Image: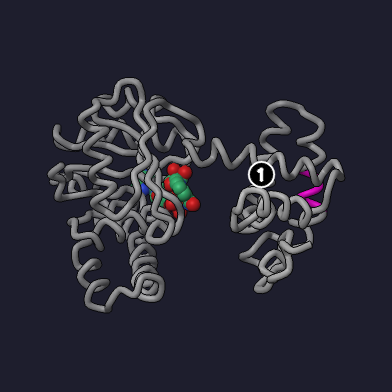
Amino acid sequence: MNYKHVTVAGSGVLGSQIAFQTAFKGFNVSVYDINDEVIERAKERFMNLKQRYQEDLGATQKDVDAAYERISFYSDLSEAVADADLVIEAIPEVVQSKMDFYRQLGKVAPEKTIFATNSSTLLPSQFAEATGRPEKFLALHFANEIWKNNTAEIMKHSGTDMKVFDEIIEFAKAIGMVPLPLHKEQPGYILNSLLVPFLEAAEMLLLKEVADVETIDKTWMIATGAPLGPFAILDVVGISTAYNIVQAKAKATGNKDFKKLAELLKTEYIDQGKLGRGTGEGFYTYPNPQFMKPDFLQG
Ligand code: NAD
């Protein structure tokens, strides 16, 4: 792996984090977004990230300044990718936007350039043809707050060259991630393939009044030694996200239980401003939720 220059397309929540982490680990990074106004907003995100790296990782002012110095900004795609070994795409989760982007990128990027998508729900095979270089394309999926939650799910589609797959695994390590290779396409990657059904199972126990929130979490925590139960995790994910997933499933399948579950999440939590940890209340109240109390697991 001898990547030196990385371009990140999209400077929103994840794009700015990917760009900063990559620069923090010594790579030259070009950030591309649709216009100069958005780029100016991205610069504010980077100021905030500099602070988070100091607070959370104990990085020095010198380190974060040096990382920022390695980032350059572009609103012209050809210029942004002129020297790129790798382009990481973090533009909105809209099929047509990504399709248009890859068609354009395929035309202007040098032949050597590898493309990786950070998409959470779309599969690389959907865009492989549009890139014009399916063998040099795959998914590289990060988690929010990349500097702390340092997973990198690396997923090939059937046409990805194994050499490219292996290089991206090395690259992920080089930027401080734990690489998690997926050898086949899987919607939701590994994490959400496990987490979504797990959280839904817990929500269904609540909906059917089998047990209350605390009993369900306590069962999981005592029996497996896990530090959080499913409802504590749902508070971190955010109840709006959980609602969107359940609502989409209710619509797609017509399943009555999912419909009832969506209603419960809306009326008892979302409509009451209980959106999870971020708002101070969800299934638990913060900053001192019940499950953190020393006697929670005792009885
Ligand atoms: P966001 O809305 O915060 O940012 C998207 C950015 O892309 C914006 O700055 C927008 O101006 C820019 N953009 C729009 N069209 C563009 C184009 N054609 N070319 C270049 N830039 C363009 O979105 P986000 O939350 O950062 O998500 C981006 C991608 O990352 C999505 O595919 C999402 O599934 C994935 N992702 C998000 C999270 C998360 O927690 N937010 C986590 C993992 C993966």
Q: Nearer the viewer, residue 210 or 294?
A: 294
Predominant secondary structure, magenta span: helix
Where 109 falls versus 157 (above or below)? Answer: below
Q: Is residue 127 left or right of residue 66?
A: right
Label 1 near ligand 1 (CB < 8 Å)? no
Q: Is residue 92 visible?
A: no
Q: Which residue is mark 1?
A: 199
Question: Magenta stretch?
Answer: 262-267
For residue 273, which quarter of the picture? bottom right
Percent across and percent down for residue 35 are 33, 54
Amino acid type of the residue tagged 1 in the rendering: Leu
For the point 69% across and 53% down, which residue is it? Answer: 231
Magenta-span inclusion, residue 118: no
Q: Is residue 9 visible?
A: yes
Q: Residue furthest right?
A: 209
In the picture, the quarter occupied by the C terminus is bottom right
Q: Within 10 Å of the Cα at label 1, are there few (<14), some (14-19), or many (20+) other Cα atoms?
A: some
Q: Is residue 263 magenta?
A: yes
The image shows residue 4, relative to residue 36, as above or below, that is above
Residue 19 location (% of width, % of height): 30, 56
In terms of image quadrants, where is residue 166?
top left
SS category of the residue bearing label 1: helix
